[in-house]
Image (cartoon, grey):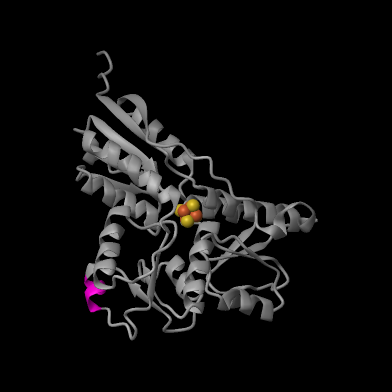
Amino acid sequence: MPPRAKPPLDILLCAPRGFCAGVVRAIDAVERALTIHGAPVYVRHEIVHNKYVVESLMRKGAIFVEELDEIADPGRPVIFSAHGVPKAVPADAAGRGMFAIDATCPLVTKVHREAEIHHKRGRHVILVGHAGHPEVVGTMGQLPDGAITLVEALDDVERLAPADPGNLAFVTQTTLSVDDTRGIVEALKARFPGIVAPHKEDICYATTNRQEAVKRVAPHVDAVLVVGSPNSSNSQRLREVAERAGCPFARLVNGAAEIDWSEFETVRRIGVTAGASAPEVLVEEIIDAFAARFEVRVDTVTTSSEDVFFPLPRELRGEAAE
Ligand code: SF4
């Protein structure tokens, strides 16, 4: 009997997708620190929210901890993750005499500095973001307790009761849904017309561009697969954006092994993207896995191009590193 023909499948690859400049910098920082200082190098929190990346770095000699007091050898370098840390963390590291390297994404640092400036000017800061996310913990930890109020949803805006409603400013997490945040910001401005906004959007270029590409693809496919970890905020947002843009069948997977193939039997067109912390090798694995089951045709849908680059943290550059 001739082998059964594979069913056809069109794959629309979203571009841009995957690694952003902040993630590349953070991973490079760990690798460079391992090259310069040897293993082990400690990393506080997952350097970026991706299991594959974390496991690869662990194999090279990185040890991941959640808090500084878990570090067995305080003489070794410690790197702070791309999400940023509360001010108390570098102060604690300095107090313990540790060699700390800050891999906080410069676009997160920009939000930290904005919050600080507002505070210095006597404004109460509203942070739009998700409670408990390390970036939110880091941003709130730039100011003294009570100087920042977190707003997660529209309802929270109604509940705000600031002591001085005429003296407010807002900042946002970098990896939020562009559309949801627009609604929250409009509500803030409607309730507090004098509220001071960021000069330049806090949601970063990578989050915005990846959401834009998914919005273009989602209405034209039967399913969207987002490659990323469940604790990656920008990956979760990509899945939601796909659903809202007209593709109710959207799944977030760490990699090909997590695909439930029974769900894809009748799918003939699929969109594929990857969160800012997901490496391209995982996207390639997924395409290979589909190609083993379908006659695939791959097209790329490009909505913007990116050429953002961030230099390594100072301690790891050229002479300073020597
Ligand atoms: S998603 Fe944006 S803010 Fe986060 S690391 Fe990447 S570029 Fe920086």
Instruction: Count the numbered circles shown.
Output: 0
Q: Is residue 175 visible?
A: yes
- Left or right: 52 as drawn, with respect to 38: left
Residue 282 in picture, x, y percent from top left: 45, 41
The quadrant where residue 289 appears: top left
Figure quadrant of the N terminus: top left
**Magenta residues?**
155-159
> Residue 22 vs residue 214: left or right?
right
Image check: 46 left or right of 128?
right
x and y percent of residue 63 in the render?
60, 63
Q: In the displayed orientation, state which residue is furthest to the top.
A: 2
Q: Main secondary structure of the magenta part?
A: helix
Instruction: From the top left corner, tell me how far across and down residue 74 is, in percent.
Output: 69, 73
- Choose between 30 and 207: the one closer to the eye: 207
The extreme bottom residue here reads 163
Q: Quadrant of residue 147?
A: bottom left
What x and y, as percent, mark residue 218? 25, 39
Q: Residue at x 42, y 78 (%)?
A: 123
| Residue appearing at x 59%, y 50% in the figure | 310
Q: Residue at x 32, y 41 (%)?
A: 214
The quarter of the rendered structure image containing the C terminus is bottom right
**Residue 50 visible in rendering:** no
Question: Relative to 246, is 237 above or below?
Answer: below
Q: Is residue 271 magenta?
A: no
